[in-house]
Amino acid sequence: MSRATSPAARVTGIVTLLRPERPRRLPESFTAAAIAGDLERLQLFLDRGADIEERSVGHASPLAASCAFGRLESARWLIARGANLDPRGATVSPIQSALGKANCEAAALLLDAGLPIERAAWGVIAAASLGRLDVLRWLLGRGLELDRSYPGVGVLRERALHHARRDGGDELVRFLRGEADPGPPPKAPPATPPARAVQPRAAPEERPALIQEARDLVRAAGTASARWDATGPLAPTQRQLLISFAAATGILEIVNALLDAGASPDFAPQGTPPPLPAAAGEAQIDVVRLLLDRGASPDGSDGRSWLPLAGAAQSGEPEVVRMLLEAGANPGARPAGSPRLPEHARGPFSREIRTLLEEAAAARRPKKTKRTR
């Protein structure tokens, strides 16, 4: 640890390094699983009756979402299982989703699977706006013609030249005017733009030493560590207590060390999640169990704000919901400013979660007694 790094920032960094390879929280929908590139959970959704043509806010289908985010593994998986290459009535089709982000490899998957090249005509306009001459030339190599009119697009050269003059740059303008000849179009699709840099993750063999370092830092700080914020360059965007960040990430040993230092399992500054709702919302079963054993209230601090059961229902993991109910959580609680708890259920097991909550609520209602004459 450098002199400029505070103990709180170092422990925050350790929590980030120790985060699991895959979130325990289940994707909230089939489309979300496609965006994550999580093929195992895509199959889980499909096995449990998900619609392969599911429509969601912003995406015509899971295939369109995969193409928009450049998730080639998801796109291949969906195409292999019969996903519609061109959903009827879609405002933005899968190939438009791909080419709008210059994800040419995803577009190539659609074309190779049988989508007519005419459906990619809009991509020439998008390439001109993005300043991507390589994308435009690749589409021409796939069979589009600049001087042909396409339905819903018009004559490509005219439309592309208009957008190139406004956004695309001189090189594109010269090419579209016929003043530059860069040679034959590329046969291979231009590479998908690189994804956002991924934060480093500790190797399994580094875990014991990092956990011990975090424990030592907490122990050295004593009760002051109980109120540490998650801070530093690897902190979450939402400011929160370090114990809540560690609880959501599932680092049981660091949560336990902070509890031993005096951190409350129920307290958090206003507007941020306390440890138990943070852990429940990310389906961190072992941390939920620890916090309940250490006295956390299964209904949160006031029975309305940051309800652990609401987070558990949204996590998609029935076991977390069951654990909180067994600890005495109120299934009839009404989260502040939110719908009833069953309506928070998400993911492939949403039906089971709703059933758990509704049956538990029914069991707590007082039974009516028959009047005797």
Image: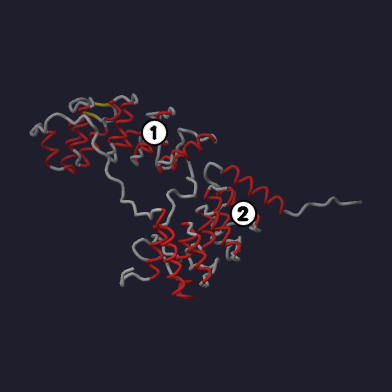
112 or 172, nearer to the observer: 112
The quadrant holding residue 111 is: top left
Residue 324 to residue 142: above or below: below
Residue bearing mark 1: 90
Distance of label 2 from label 1 (alpha carbons): 42 Å
Please name the colour scheme applied to the rendered image. secondary structure
99 or 40, nearer to the observer: 40
- Mark 1 is on which residue type? Ala
Q: Are marks 2 and 1 in contact (CB under 8 Å)?
A: no
| Of pointers 2 and 1, the one earlier in the residue sequence | 1
Mark 2 crowd level (few <14, some 14–19, many ≥20, 10 Å Cα): some
Residue bearing mark 2: 323
Would you say 316 lies left or right of 97 here? right
Placement of the N terminus among the 4 image quadrants = bottom left
Residue 88 place in picture, x, y as percent: 40, 29
- Mark 2 is on which residue type? Met
Q: Is residue 144 visible?
A: yes
Would you say 202 lies left or right of 172 here? right
Front tag of 2 and 1: 2
Residue 274 place in picture, x, y as percent: 51, 63
Residue 104 place in picture, x, y as percent: 27, 35
Circle 2 — which element? Answer: helix
Q: Residue furthest left?
A: 179
Q: Is residue 88 visible?
A: no
The quadrant holding residue 92 is: top left
